[in-house]
Image (cartoon, coloured by chain):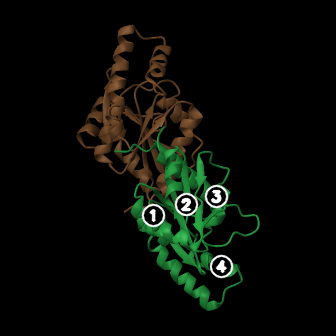
Chain colours: A green, B brown
Amino acid sequence: MSKGLLIVLSGPSGVGKGTVCNALRGKMDNLVYSVSATTRVPRIGEENGVNYFFKSHDEFKYMMENEQLLEYAEYVGNYYGTPRDFVEDTLQSGKDIILEIEVQGALKVKEKFPEGIFIFLLPPSLDELKDRICGRGTETQATIDHRLSVAVDEIGLVGHYDYAVVNDQIDQACKRIESIVIAEHCKVRG
Amino acid sequence: MSKGLLIVLSGPSGVGKGTVCNALRGKMDNLVYSVSATTRVPRIGEENGVNYFFKSHDEFKYMMENEQLLEYAEYVGNYYGTPRDFVEDTLQSGKDIILEIEVQGALKVKEKFPEGIFIFLLPPSLDELKDRICGRGTETQATIDHRLSVAVDEIGLVGHYDYAVVNDQIDQACKRIESIVIAEHCKVRG
């Protein structure tokens, strides 16, 4: 049995990574979704090992210091990261695994897993991205401006990725990602 | 408008290149089929520029000598080749073009168009290929043995190709080829 593929889906905040990732669920038989580790307290209905691996701050710190995370980041006082073991065990079992992460995190994963398939999700246009960020309706103008400026910087990093997929329509974006995975399985490797 | 992609579908004799190529027709909007030049006399119903570009031996020789063919080969006393202009004009118009050719011809095209997408169609097994060659029912045992031996040599050249697609079921092989084309359009190029 051959090893699975590591697929990293990334892109600027607001581009629709989560929505596309959810839409992919159930469409692809051989694809497992990476489960993140977090220090955040579980919400009602969340299960350990399904939604997240829930860790204490000490446990998370141990994982950080012992190379057990492919990447991690702090967000509103809690840590989130990608456990290396879960990824490697899935690949060894012959299944593909998809990580949905921020642009900086994806580039950290690339350092450790250069053989991964790095897909950058692009908005159809910057205007459209602005609409999507504003659409959440919870942000001040300054926050919107800042997030848009970060997004523009992140889009400048697309050259570090293998594929760029425009998220114009969710089903089209999903079809492109599915096609990339099928094609990568057909690739002749040197 | 961006240039189209040159897709070269090749593989050993008997693997089903023609069948797969025909099944792809109509499935992919942006795909044009390369029209070969030949010195063979048109059969009833064949149209110049549709089935083939019909050429005299002198015209074909002129094309050979003036780099107007991406590859050519002789078969039962007639020449067959791929006109460069037709391929380049199609690519310039923003459409993809597919060439269905023999393994040696594909490698010649690769010398001239290294940016092409080279797909090798594989039989599910050598036994299956043998059955397909025998299945034509027109070959002697010596011919079958020879063709199988050539096929084995040709399969050894798969490393020169970008993708290997197993032709186990025609619709599955078509889906893989469609996926490769979609994925290649999403590729971030350096």
Crowding at dot 3, Cα within 10 Å, few <14 / some 14-19 / many 20+, comes out as: few
Question: What amino acid type should be assigned to the residue bearing mark 3?
Answer: Gly
Q: Look at the image and tell me whether residue A36 can be seen.
A: yes
Disc 4 + disc 2, Cβ < 8 Å: no
Chain-order first, disc 1 or disc 4: 1
Going by the numbered disc 2, the residue's amino acid type is: Leu
- Residues at marks 3 and 2 touching, judged by CB atoms closer than 8 Å: no
Q: Position of residue A4 (x, y in %)?
A: 50, 47
Q: Nearer the viewer, residue B75 or B160?
A: B160
- Amino acid identity at mark 1: Val
Which numbered circle lies on residue A131? 4
**Which residue is tagged 3?**
A49
Q: Position of residue A115 (x, y in %)?
A: 41, 54
Q: Position of residue B46 (x, y in %)?
A: 50, 29
Give the class, few, some or many, for how many residues have Cα within 10 Å of label 1's Cα (few <14, many ≥20).
Answer: many
Residue B31 in sight in this render: no
- Distance Cα–Cα, label 1 vs label 4: 30 Å
Q: Are marks 2 and 1 in contact (CB under 8 Å)?
A: yes
Decide which of tag 1 and tag 3 comes sooner along the chain: 3
Between marks 1 and 4 in the image, the one whose residue lies nearer the viewer: 1
Numbered circle sitting on residue A109? 1
Circle 3 chain: A
Give whichever of discs 4 and 2 has the lower sequence position. Answer: 2
Q: Which residue corresponds to mark 2?
A: A99
